[in-house]
């Protein structure tokens, strides 16, 4: 039987390994061993390790971009748009843990020599959502910080969970924990969208000589 393997199967294997071990911790040999083929076959089908990583990150970006474009285009009026984006983002990453894992590796300086990925793949998504919600954000709140708060909270919860009230942790493999986290995330976003409180009224000055 010829030593042939589907291109997407190579990408899927590389996605799993890059997410689990990082780019720096994954060798081309490890990828080929996991697939049961030679390194030369992997290179012939999908390229070297760098080419594999770039395609993996590109596919991860395209999946997230497609989700956000759909959510943004269908979002309702007013603040409901922000909450629909929150739900779409959370649901996507719950359903696609490999995406979160790939970016979690980068957060600990994995593939630090490939420095352009955030500008190439994260910035366009922030711009996409920012254009949709910027008129809803109070002037004293930075839109990118608001979106960053959503991203940090979602990835923090999916990566480590939250404390249970009694003991132990509640994690994303528990649907009830996801819904509890979702509710709190909506509360947080609503607080960030609250208009700036007006300054307190000054009490009228009393003329002591009157």
Image: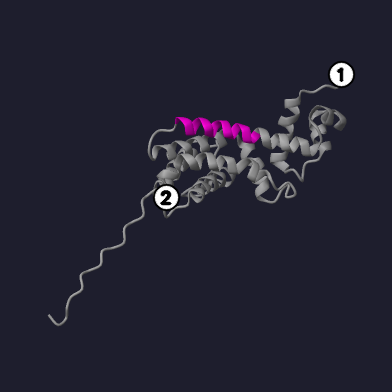
Q: Say above or below: 79 vs 74.
A: below
Residue 154 in percent (x, y) is at: 53, 44
* Residue that label 1 marks: 2
Outermost residue to the top: 1
In the image, residue 61 lies in the stretch drawn in magenta:
yes
Considering the whole magenta stretch, tell me its main secondary structure.
helix
Q: Decide if residue 26 is on the left or right side of residue 205.
A: right
Which quarter of the image is occupied by the N terminus? top right
> Which residues are the magenta region?
60-74
Residue 190 in percent (x, y) is at: 40, 46
Q: How is the image coloured?
A: one colour
Q: Decide if residue 38 is on the left or right side of residue 86.
A: right
Give the mark nearest the N terminus, 1 or 2. Answer: 1
* Residue that label 2 marks: 192
The residue at the point 73 percent across, 43 percent down is 21
The residue at the point 51 percent across, 30 percent down is 70
Which quarter of the image is occupied by the C terminus? bottom left
Q: Is residue 165 visible?
A: yes
Q: Say above or below: 110 vs 3.
A: below
Residue 100 in percent (x, y) is at: 61, 40
Residue 167 in percent (x, y) is at: 51, 49
């Amino acid at each position: 039987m010829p030593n042939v393997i589907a291109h997407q199967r190579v990408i899927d294997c590389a996605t799993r390994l890059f997410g689990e071990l990082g780019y720096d911790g994954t060798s081309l040999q490890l990828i080929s061993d996991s697939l049961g083929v030679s390194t030369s076959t992997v290179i012939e089908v999908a390229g070297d390790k760098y080419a594999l990583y770039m395609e993996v990150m590109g596919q991860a970006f395209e999946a997230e971009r497609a989700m956000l474009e759909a959510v943004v285009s269908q979002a309702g009026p007013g603040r409901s748009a922000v909450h629909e984006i929150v739900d779409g983002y959370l649901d996507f990453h719950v359903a696609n843990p490999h995406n979160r894992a790939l970016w979690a590796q980068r957060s600990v300086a994995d593939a630090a020599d490939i420095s352009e990925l955030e500008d190439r793949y994260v910035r366009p998504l922030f711009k996409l959502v920012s254009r949709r919600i910027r008129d809803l954000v109070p002037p004293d709140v930075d839109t990118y910080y608001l979106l960053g708060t959503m991203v940090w909270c979602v990835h923090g919860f999916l990566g480590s969970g939250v404390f249970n009230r009694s003991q132990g942790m509640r994690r994303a493999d528990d649907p009830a924990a996801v819904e509890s986290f979702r509710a709190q995330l909506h509360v947080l976003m609503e607080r960030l969208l609250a208009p700036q409180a007006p300054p307190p009224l000054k009490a009228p000055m009393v003329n002591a000589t009157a």
